[in-house]
Image: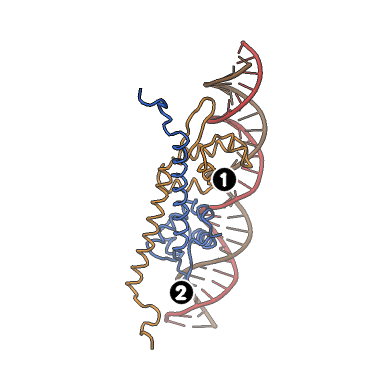
Chain colours: A blue, B orange, C red, D brown
Amino acid sequence: MTNARSLIEVLGEPMRITILERLLDAPATATELAQQLPVTRSAISQHLQTMKSAGLVADTPAGTRRVYAVDPDALALLRSYFDAFWNRSLEGFRRAAETAPTPIRPGGTP
Amino acid sequence: MTNARSLIEVLGEPMRITILERLLDAPATATELAQQLPVTRSAISQHLQTMKSAGLVADTPAGTRRVYAVDPDALALLRSYFDAFWNRSLEGFRRAAETAPTPIRPGGTP
DNA sequence: AGCTTGCGCAAGCCATGACTAACGCAAGGT
DNA sequence: ACCTTGCGTTAGTCATGGCTTGCGCAAGCT
């Protein structure tokens, strides 16, 4: 867990990324989320547990309530992951450009 | 299509993000990918079509072959998406800090 | 023309997982 | 002590979708 791939796998579910965006505005409980989303509280609770075991969110018991918040470390991990993707993409382009400097009209302008 | 959420939804499948990482090294055909991954060429082809319709990859016909490559725009979109998440997270922390400047030991060091 | 290669498409099977309903439990409040 | 509230958990249903097999098609070579 807590690697970027498993985080992305968890966020692949549309309801979970909706929950994440909602939690980014402010921490909330399962009941509050269920009131704003078209699923039952049980479904929310299950999603939250999945997200928690992946390290996406953290829960804080507060009396009888249980507040969930986004874990910033997970966001940082995702950010750096796609940053690396982006850099690798640029590198691939550079390598392709070196292999074939002027692939179009190799003889130059006639 | 071509919004960050649908891109993430597509990458939620482990095989597809594996394909993406492989394609980042170098463009490849469905057959080449199938030789390196533990699924049939048909499965690869279906994944590539899903990724293509989401805007993640682009295909270039080359004779009888068909070369797939990662679309850099999609990577840029994902990058900026999680950048925004990160910034929103920081903003949330600042707002929480303003609401309760010193939530621990409000009376100061005794 | 005939053969080969590379590819997408369609049908069907099957496991994954998202969801609901019902239950049990802890924490306060009256 | 007795509700009430807020949660997590379990059992069970059902749709989604990933995978394979088999087929048809287009492009290029001999």
Please tell me the numbered disc located at residue A58: none
The numbered dot on residue A62 is 2
On screen, residue B106 above or below B13: below
The reply, left or right, for residue B64 in relation to residue A28 is: right
> Looking at the image, which residue is at 46% across and 44% down?
A91
Q: Which residue is mark 1?
A: B15
Residue A70: give x, y in percent of width and height: 44, 63
Q: Position of residue B46 (x, y in %)?
A: 55, 37
User: What amino acid type should be assigned to the residue bearing mark 2?
Assistant: Ala
Q: Residue furthest bottom?
A: B110
* Chain for numbered disc 2: A
As drawn, B108 above or below B18:
below
Q: Position of residue C30 (x, y in %)?
A: 42, 81
Depth order, front residue of B4/A43: B4
Residue found at x 38% / y 77%: B103
Q: Nearer the viewer, mark 1 or mark 2?
A: 1
Q: Nearer the viewer, residue A44 or D1?
A: A44
Residue D5, compared with residue A9, is above or below; it is below
Mark 2 Cα-neighbour bin, 10 Å: few <14, some 14–19, many ≥20: few
